[in-house]
Amino acid sequence: MVIDIHPHVISDDESRYPPAPLFGKRSDWSQERPSTVETLIAQMDAAGVDKAAVVHSSTTYGFDNSYVVDACNAWPDRLLAVGSVDVRAPDACAVIADWTARGLGGLRIFTGGSTKDFDPSELEDEAAYPAWELMGELGLTMCIQTGPVGLTQVSALARRFPNVPIILDHLGRPDPTDGPPYAAAQSLFDLAAIPSIYLKLTPRIMGDCVKGDADPASWFGTLVERFGASRMAWGSNYPTSPGTLAEIRQTAQDRLASLSAEDREWIFGRTAAALYSRLA
């Protein structure tokens, strides 16, 4: 079974699901390449993707998870919603409980990206600790969108809340272009000792691993050696990343071709099923 843990969906009904982007700036991709849930399902069928953990678009809807939840609830046998909540807000626990009751199956913190520079201070705020405690009780995973600047904070959260699996979006954006032994990515490798931290392999790293002195075989081989394939999962980033879902999946398969068949089984499905049991 092939599972994608990082596609997005955008509604074509702005009156029902009005855009209200986090940080006040809407992402270009969500306007140029919007994809409804019906389009996503068609893309999955064409790409041979069985199931997906669909990540809420914070740069379109802020903390309103209505569309991703409604979209995934319409396809419960194939999709699971991963949403965003202001975990520092006084009512964060009540809000998380409400969205979970409505079908949300995971959470994500967006500290920056295409519309804003990374700000890891959100990951240091003790006001979020009750929300993290609740995530552990509810069995929710947490995706974190950050760069190398936030990995120290990610490490601290993982050690404080070891029962909350943390998935690093885009691997935390390491720079592999210096080539083996990839010294520039040491801050990422340092996280390998923390078993609750997982890596999300997306088109960003599939592109970076063929730049400079990097090469896919040594880069992904190093990641498997450090973390193990059972802590790595593929995410398409469709439609944020250009191309069809089939094209994105094929590129990932090509980049990971040097790994063993068992390692690729983990990356393309088994790890995702472990992180999101409802997709198993």
Image (tube, rainbow, N blue to C red):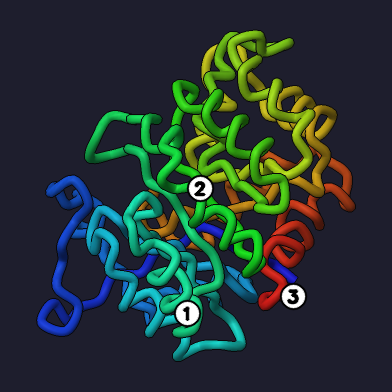
Mark 3 vs 2: CB contact within 8 A: no
Image quadrant of residue 105? Answer: bottom right
Image quadrant of residue 99? Answer: bottom left
**Which amino acid, by three-letter code, is at mark 1?**
Ile
**Above or below for 80 versus 257:** below
Identify the residue shown where x is 87% and y is 51%: 261
What is the quadrant of the N terminus in the image?
bottom right
| Front tag of 1 and 3 | 3
Q: Which residue is mark 1?
A: 41
**Which amino acid, by three-letter code, is at mark 2?**
Tyr
Secondary structure of the residue carrying numbered label 3: loop
Residue 254 visible: no
| Front tag of 3 and 2 | 2
What is the quadrant of the C terminus in the image?
bottom right
Give the left or right position of residue 143, taking residue 84 as reference.
right
Q: Which residue is mark 2?
A: 129
Residue 52 visible: yes
Q: Which residue is mark 3?
A: 280
